[in-house]
Amino acid sequence: MGWNRVRKVAEAGTVKHWLQTLEPSMQAEEERQLKSSIEKVEKALAGDKELSYAFRLTINIVRQRGRVDGLREGLKLYQYGVRILERNTPLFWSIMKYAARFSDRKKPSTPQICEYLDRELRRIGQLKTGGHNKPVKKSVIAPPESWGCDTWAEALEIKRNDVDVLFSAARAEAHSEQFATLMAWSLWGHPRTAKPKRKP
C-alpha cells in the first residue's frame, strides 16, 4: 500500500489524511520551511531578549509535546493492530488487506472477494500439489468448515448471507479511519528506500 492510497479523512472531501502530509519524501522540504520560518521570527525578535527567549521556549515545548503525542498515538495504533490480529481470524485479515487495496468509493464487491480468495486457494494448492490447479480445503483462507463448501464460489451460492456478513465486516474495518491511520503510520515509520543501481 503506497502513500497515494492512504485513506482520506472521513467526509473531508479532497482533504488528505493528515499523515499523508508527512510522507518521507516530503519531510526534507517541511523541515526546510520550518527552519526558515524560525530563523525569520528569531531575526525579527533579535532586539527583544525577553520575546526571543519566550519564542525559543515555546518552540521547545511544542516539540516536546509533539514527541509525547506521537508516542501516545503510536501506542494506540499498536494496541489497535494487536487487537484486530487477536480478535479476528487469518481469513478476516486476508479479506481486510485485499479490501484495503481499493478506494473508499470503489470497494470490492462480494463476488470480487470470492474470486480473489479462490484464486489464492488455487495458488496455494499449486504450491502444495506440485502444479495441480486444485483449491486447498484446509487453508486458513478457505470457507469455514462448518459451511460445507470447498470454494468461495460455492459458498456464495449456498451461504450468501453468511458470506455477505463476513465480507461486509472486513470491508468496513479495512476502510475505517483507524486502520487507514495504522497503515499510514507503518509507512511513515518504515519508509521504502530505493535499491542501489547495479554497476554495468
Image (spheres, rainbow, N blue to C red):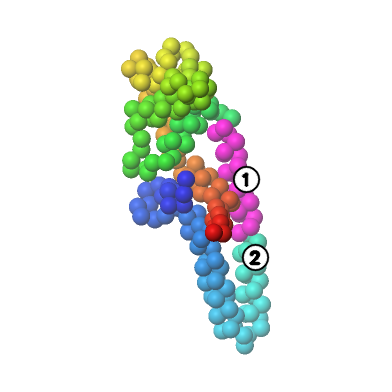
Residue 43 spot, x, y in % from top left = 58, 83
As drawn, the residue found furthest toward the bottom would be 47
Residue 16, label in figure = none
Closer mark to the observer between disc 1 and disc 2 = 1
- Image spot of residue 194 (x, y percent): 54, 56
Q: Which residue is mark 2?
A: 61
Visible residue check, residue 161: no
Q: Is residue 195 visible?
A: yes
Q: Which mark is residue 75?
A: 1
Question: Dot 2: few (<14), some (14–19), or many (≥20) neighbours within 10 Å?
Answer: few
Q: Position of residue 116 (x, y in %)?
A: 40, 30
Is 97 situated left or right of 75 in this image?
left
| Lower position in the chain sequence, tag 1 or tag 2 | 2
Which residue is pictured at 42% across the width and 48% down the height? 5
Q: Check disc 1: other Cα within 10 Å, few if <14, some if 14-19, many if 20+.
A: few
Q: How many marks?
A: 2
Q: Along the line of sight, which residue is nearer the eye, 19 or 190?
A: 190
Let me know if residue 77 is in the magenta part. yes
Q: How far apart, in angstroms, are the residues tagged by discs 1 and 2?
A: 21 Å
Residue depicted at x 47% and y 36%: 97
Residue 157, image quadrant:
top left
**Which residue sits at x=51%, y=22%?**
130
Q: Amino acid at mark 1?
A: Leu
**Residue in front for this viewpoint, 66 or 175:** 175
Residue 83 percent location from the top left of the image: 58, 34
Q: Is residue 2 above or below residue 91?
A: below
Reply above or below: 52 against 162. Answer: below
Q: For the magenta stretch, what is the residue range? A: 66-85
Residue 16 within the magenta-colored segment of the rendering: no
Q: What's the amino acid at mark 2?
A: Ile
SS class, disc 2: helix
Horizontally, is 112 left or right of 43 in the view? left
